[in-house]
Amino acid sequence: MAGFLLRRLVNYVVLALVATFLAFTLASATFDPIGVLQQRNPPPPAASIEAKKRDLHLDQPIPQRFVTWMGGVVQGDFGRTITDRPITDELGRRIGVSLRLFLLGITIGILFGVLLGVVSAIRQYKFSDYFATLFSFILLSTPVFVLGTLLKMGAQGINDSIGTNVLIFVGETTPGFQGNWFEHLGDRLQHLIVPTLAIALGQIAYYSRYQRSSMLDVLGSDFLRTAQAKGLTRRKALFKHGLRTALIPMATLFAFGFGLLVVGGTFTERIFGWFGMGDWLVTGISAQDTNITATVTLFVAVCVLFSGWLADVLYAALDPRIRVN
Amino acid sequence: MTVILNEGDAAGTTGAASGGPVDAAPEPGKAMTRGRLVLIRFMRNKLALVGLLVIIGMYLMAFVGPLLSKWSYDTQDYTAFLEPPYSEHIFGTDKIGTDMFALTMRGLQKSLIIGLLVALISTTVAAIVGAAAGYFLGVADKALMWVVDLLLVLPSFLIIAILSPWFRGKSWFLLVLMLAAFQWMITARIVRGMTLTLKEREFVKAAKFMGQPARKIIAKHIVPNMASLLIIDATINVGSAVLAETGLSYFGFGVQSPDVSLGTLIGGNAESATTFPWLFLFPAGFLVVFVLAVNWVGDGLRDALDPTSTRVRRKEKKDTKEKAA
């Protein structure tokens, strides 16, 4: 068991390193920060361009630049942006903003997704099943950037009809907000509702489809009939024997889901004006900044790594066959 | 065995793609071919049928629609700025007086072409690489598995976004190639798995012992036997390619001006969605409806082509039960 988890962990760490190296190399090869500088009017003097090149290590070959950057990362220094600000200063705050959104979104998504899937499997071909199917089909066909904007329009409508700003959809907190911690919490919650919904709805749709089909497979199985035959109530049999078995194939999906979530989070953060990691990625690529791009990639890789590993732990916890081997 | 399968698949696709007549009653005494069975199953699925009509309608509309409208995307109506939809401009106008119908149709054209091309290319590549990896095993196989794992950590969205400065100002066809380059891996892995079982079958062994070269065996005996999977996959891929393209274009990492796609339209107008909703709702609506239709058709094809698919099996079981009762 410990060996299995350790093997998986090593595998993920190697993958994360390769992914970061790849992102760094691709970014270094395609980005042209000096070109952006040269287009300034009036053009900066040659000496300052040379100095900038040296600052950004552009005079070195790419693998060497990666080693320099990675050496800093190991010591907690993620390098500097093109505009010469240390990345590490901003990193913590941005990670906090993103994780708040992601963790809440994925928790709600998994919880309600699994619930919705189970319910529509148990009530197959009933009205609620058709409704859930239609709901998730429409949501799965709606990209986050459309869904987010629609939610924004909906929140605007609700605010207009109530007359006050209950649902706030710009930023993650009111700038210059005064009050005790409880009022602060309320303020953050007001900002959190709409963006979290934008993330969670897609996740609910995604997980509920898979949960439904895996639950349907379990519903027809012999062991469930046996459990009921030996005297368990249907509800108990379904949740103690059925749901647990149906969750096993889902564990692998949770890892995939996180990668999806990060991409979705990028759109959500941009739409709702949250300055998190996703927003930083778009800023970094638009400014052709290799260090920012590589830092965000590393963050994504670590997130996927962690959720993948968590999925493995979950897998082992749910499926005794894995623990024995 | 192979011959029947091939024939069935080919007939099934053409029938589905052109929406052939269903009411042609089967001639008495003629055996039911697989193609006919697939066609009947597909036609029984109302949602899939509606989806198919919507897709055909959208392709027609995108290419014929602009010819019927008196406004073109490159002319402005100086008497109508930011007008909501009315009889003259059925989708309204934007802030420089361009007709939104003409713009939306132009964006739809580009998005639909990109979706179709990406799906065709990526499914072809997936079939070839997956079959080759499964048939030859060895290095190609190992590399494939690694790349798929890597994509989990480094989503294709991220890679293409990083590479976007490189194809800025070049042809949109480069974007098609990039999207296709990152969409084939997961299918290739499924194809590889199927190849592993297929290559142990008698007809493949017979062909091998008769001296057929490997590439002929793959092209003539292995790939045609996976036709159902590939058709379903190509259909679903049209939808995901359109979603990937619009997502990238939303941030300006995909289709570049002067080209217009649904993604650039949605991205450009998302900010003003709460005040001028028609600028956003029409392109977004077309996108969602198209992807929804593609998903329904994909689902219908899966039910029709794949005899092990749960829905058909359950339905047919139900049908026979009802008949028995």
Image (cartoon, coloured by chain):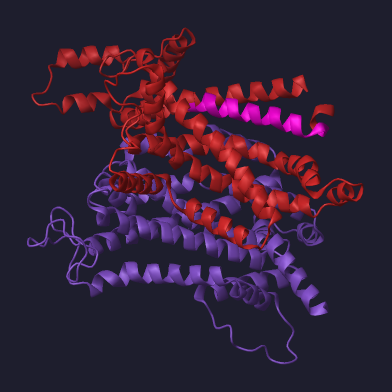
Quadrant of the frame with the C terminus of chain B: bottom right
Q: Nearer the viewer, residue A211 or A313?
A: A211
Question: Would residue A309 be counted in the magenta stretch?
Answer: yes
**Position of residue B124 in the picture relative to residue A115 (left or right):** left
Q: Is residue A55 visible?
A: yes
For image coordinates 45% across by 31% down, the residue present is: A101
A149 in relation to A276, above or below = below
Chain given the colour red: A
Measured as percent of width and height from the top left, residue A134 is found at 54, 59
- Residue stretch in magenta: A300-321
Quadrant of the frame with the N terminus of chain B: bottom right
Question: Would residue B159 be counted in the magenta stretch?
Answer: no
The furthest residue to the right: A230
Q: Nearer the viewer, residue B30 or B88?
A: B88
Measured as percent of width and height from the top left, residue A233 is found at 83, 47
Measured as percent of width and height from the top left, residue A156 is found at 30, 45
Q: Is residue B148 visible?
A: no
For image coordinates 62% across by 30% down, the residue present is: A308
Chain given the colour purple: B
Which SS does the magenta portion mostly show?
A: helix
Q: Quadrant of residue B66?
A: bottom left
For image coordinates 50% across by 76% down, the residue present is: B18
Q: Nearer the viewer, residue B253 or A34?
A: B253
How many marks the image carries: the answer is 0
B192 in relation to B52, above or below = above
B13 in relation to B31, above or below = above
**Position of residue A138 in the picture relative to residue B66 (left or right):** right
The furthest residue to the top: A75
Measured as percent of width and height from the top left, residue A148 is found at 38, 44
The furthest residue to the bottom: B28
